Image: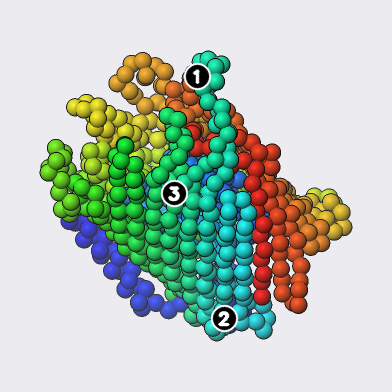
Amino acid sequence: MHNTKKLISIVVLLNIFQFAHGQSKLDSIQHLKEVVVTVRSYKEVIPAQKLTGEDLKALNSFSVADAIRYFSGIQVKDYGGIGGLKTVNIRSMGTHHVGVFYDGIQLGNAQNGQIDLGKFSLDNMEDISLYNGQKSDIFQPAKDFGSSGSVYLHTRTPQFSKNKNYNLKTTLKTGSFDLINPSVLYEHKIGNDLKASFNVEMMNTSGKYKYRYKRVYPGLKEVMYDTTAVRKNGDVFSFRSEAGLYGTIPDGLWKVKLYYYDSNRGLPGAIVNNVWKNSQRQWDRSFFVQGSFQKSVTNKYEIQANAKFAYDFMRFLNPDTTTMRIDNSFHQREWYGSLANKYAITPNWDISLSTDVQYNSLSSDMPGFFFPQRTTSLIALASAVEMGNFKIQGSILATFVNEDLRIGNYNPDSPYQDTVVAAPDKQELTPAFFISYKPFRNKDLNFRAFYKKIFRMPTFNDLYYTNIGFSALKPEFTHQFDVGFQYSRSFKNGFIKYVQMQADAYYNEVTDKIVAEPAKSSLYRWTMTNIGSVEIWGIDASLSAAFQLLYDIGMNLKLAYTYQKAQDFTRKDNPVLQEMSYGGQINYIPWHSGSVIASMTHKSWQLNYSFIYVGERYENSVNIQEFYQQPWYTHDMAIIKNFKMNNINMRIAGEINNLFGQDYEVVLNYPMPKRNYRILLTIEL
């Protein structure tokens, strides 16, 4: 391991030396003294699913989590209302296998591995992209190669019209649940080579909404509960602020971003055992500062550097003394640095080398909690080549993980206190291969396929959480196989202006899956083990089209459909449970799901409609009637008017969500809101 660390240090130092002594020429699209320079883009093999600015405006979406539900192959777990946790799962491989990137750098949570997408607003979002496998760009940090699927969130980059050196946008949202949600975005042109932006947003809501709760006795038609109640303890107050600097230098660019988020929320909890109100609360504070630098050294050689520091605080309070009073705080810190190099061997053949180093630590006031530390080093070697009608990419990622434990809060009452040790060091080598074929040079039809092997590390909670963690856990691996096609075409004349179709068939395998089970020594002590196994067969399909219905009436349409057979082949000690669950559809994965987004425009008016369908599923891999979950669907509509007053651009929108007031639950016992409303007013200068 000592030699491995020495090798990594040498590679990083060589990269820094090249970075410090290079000359430059940029090979992408940038603003250099208001002149746009355009050259060859990277060789995309597997295109992304993407929602751009106009697409996002056509959705009645409150957060990033609401928006990405419209991608195919996605499952979003929503634990109820505005304040509930919202996590994303791509192609049934699990939330922990999804990498979420904010302006090019990954968001982290070493404690539990989950990113709450409900915390990220759409107010300043430029586009959202979803990649299966990995992004088709070899010129990227090594971390970008390290996930089974990735979601990229790109915030708005300042752009200015001629003779204008500032932009100002204010938005106010109000509506059901006592919602008040103002935001301000200010952008300033400091000079031709330097721009700044500042965005601040506040949200306050009571989170109260009516819902119907109905339950019948398992296997019987007799009603257990059937009542209408009000969801309580779902209040949220949050504050978000972001500041950014965007600069260009000769043949290069750089940017720096500061982000701060602060929230105080109630956790409405699950409705079980005739308990209709929960008193638990959670406080979150997140801060990060990150920077990126990109420069072309020669006509063939480019370099990219990224750095980040992040701090996260979370306090959880359960004041209920009838169960167990809990008041614990957790502090996470992350340091991250990356250096990527790309060299063009020929005009159609590129290679890249990326080296990353990341340090994570976690501390807490919880009795008996040790303070884990993790150092992760990554080296990615990748190549992309275009040969006639073929585009090929390959990469190999080397990951080295070192764990350490600092003495934390000693708990003499814990019989397991002295048995906690740091997890052993880990080294993994994981490949990926992508290929696409375009049979006709002048036709927008291509076929693609890929294979990728990757893993996710056990989280700090998996390894060290008091009386649950197990430090000998192995990484959880995924193997992905995919074949698909894409066809797109634009039309100069006629009713149809543009159409794009794509479909993929895939097989995913998750091995050494981390699951919780009772320890053999005590049924009261659960532990994490590598006994899980899941196999997923699926089909994703999507269609996008633009129509010109009449001279001044246009229409955009997006359709998405997913079929998944995700089977649990986890072995179990209980032979009866093994027989009942073996091969069952894993929990909360529907066989069929889909969405529709339609937008119609007429002069300054716009009418938007969106629809989501989630088919039947089970809340347990034991697929029996007791765990059956009915399909649910929602219809949302919005009408928008754009107008000017004294040369001020204004936009007013009225939204109706869950138009037909369906009672539904994304997660069992977490009822979602019925019909609700919002009004939005936007002013731009």
Dot 1 amino acid type: Tyr
Which of the two marks, 2 or 3, is nearer to us in this view? Answer: 3
Badge 2 density bin: few <14, some 14–19, many ≥20, Cα 10 Å: some
Residue 389 vs 164, above or below: the answer is above
Residue 189: numbered disc: 2
Relative image position of residue 215 (x, y in whole percent): 53, 25
Kindly identify which residue carries mark 3. 266
Determine whether, in the image, residue 522 is placed left or right of residue 672.
left
Kindly identify which residue carries mark 1. 217
Mark 2 → mark 3, Cα distance in angstroms: 41 Å
Tell me the SS state at disc 2. strand
Tell me the SS state at disc 3. strand
The reply to whether callout 2 and callout 3 are in contact (CB within 8 Å) is no
Dot 3 amino acid type: Gly
Badge 3 density bin: few <14, some 14–19, many ≥20, Cα 10 Å: many
Q: Earlier in the sequence, mark 1 or mark 2?
A: 2
Tell me the SS state at disc 1. loop
Q: Nearer the viewer, residue 207 or 131?
A: 207
Dot 2 amino acid type: Lys
Relative image position of residue 82 (x, y in whole percent): 53, 49
Q: Earlier in the sequence, mark 2 or mark 3?
A: 2
Determine whether, in the image, residue 304 is placed left or right of residue 680.
left
Q: Quadrant of the C terminus?
A: bottom right
Residue 454: numbered disc: none
Q: Quadrant of residue 649?
A: bottom right
Residue at the (49%, 51%) spot, across then down: 235
Residue at the (24%, 32%) spot, across then down: 525
Relative image position of residue 600 (x, y in whole percent): 77, 52
Residue 611 vs 11, above or below: the answer is above
Q: Earlier in the sequence, mark 3 or mark 1?
A: 1
Residue 683 vs 472, above or below: the answer is below
Determine whether, in the image, residue 484 is placed left or right of residue 626.
right
